[in-house]
Image (cartoon, rainbow, N blue to C red):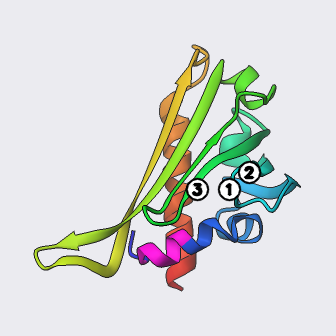
Amino acid sequence: MASSANDVWGAVFVATNMYPEAMPDQITAIRVTNRDGVTAGSIREITYGKEIKRMVARATEEITRVDHEHRTIESRFNNDREFVGKIFRSASLVIKVDPNSFDNGPSSRGCTITWTLTYSGFKDNLNFKMFQDAIGRGFASLDTYLTN
């Protein structure tokens, strides 16, 4: 991504307002139903945009761990009937934001975002590549939003 690691990591903490504006084809709304929406134990209900809605309309995510030092946030979807019931048996997500490194060390120029979904029981009738590509386009949209 062209955006700095600090900018992308900061976007994680204003996701409820920023993501629907920055990537409307992927996420149209995020509603916090427990805690503040950015700390462990927070629960967020995510309504998906047209690219993901073809597979699943919404998901309920519980944030399980936030590590500011390593810019990592973890969550799970195990108690969600829509996301887990229609796509997976169980699923957890880790998002990690790393500054790009060059020969002279870390730089404020750009970052790499690693989105790791661990799951069991992916439904055979769904196209995982389509799901993966939609997520990638969402992060590209976020990058454009942050750099403009």
In which quarter of the view is residue 103 placed? bottom left
Question: Which residue is at the front of the view, 130 or 14?
Answer: 14
Give the residue type that dot 3 points to: Val
Q: Earlier in the sequence, mark 1 or mark 2?
A: 1
Give the residue type that dot 1 points to: Asp
User: Taking 56 as reference, is 37 above or below it?
Assistant: below
Left or right: 41 with respect to 134?
A: right
In which quarter of the view is residue 100 placed? bottom left
Under circle 3, the secondary element is: strand
Residue at horizontal 47 percent and vertical 33 percent from the top: 129
Q: Quadrant of the C terminus?
A: bottom right
Label 3 or label 2, whichever lies nearer to me, is: 3
Q: Earlier in the sequence, mark 3 or mark 1?
A: 1
User: Label 2: which residue?
Assistant: 49
Question: Which residue is at the front of the view, 131 or 42?
Answer: 42
Q: CA distance from mark 1 to mark 2?
A: 5 Å
Q: CA distance from mark 3 to mark 1?
A: 26 Å
User: Taking 118 as reference, is 53 above or below it?
Assistant: below
The x, y position of residue 121, in whole percent, is: 58, 15
Residue at horizontal 32 percent and vertical 81 percent from the top: 109
User: Label 1: which residue?
Assistant: 25
Residue at horizontal 50 percent and vertical 40 percent from the top: 132
Question: Could you say which disc has been placed on residue 139 in the image?
Answer: none
Q: Which residues are magenta?
A: 4-9
Q: Earlier in the sequence, mark 3 or mark 2?
A: 2
Question: Which residue is at the front of the view, 122 or 96?
Answer: 96
User: Label 3: which residue?
Assistant: 66
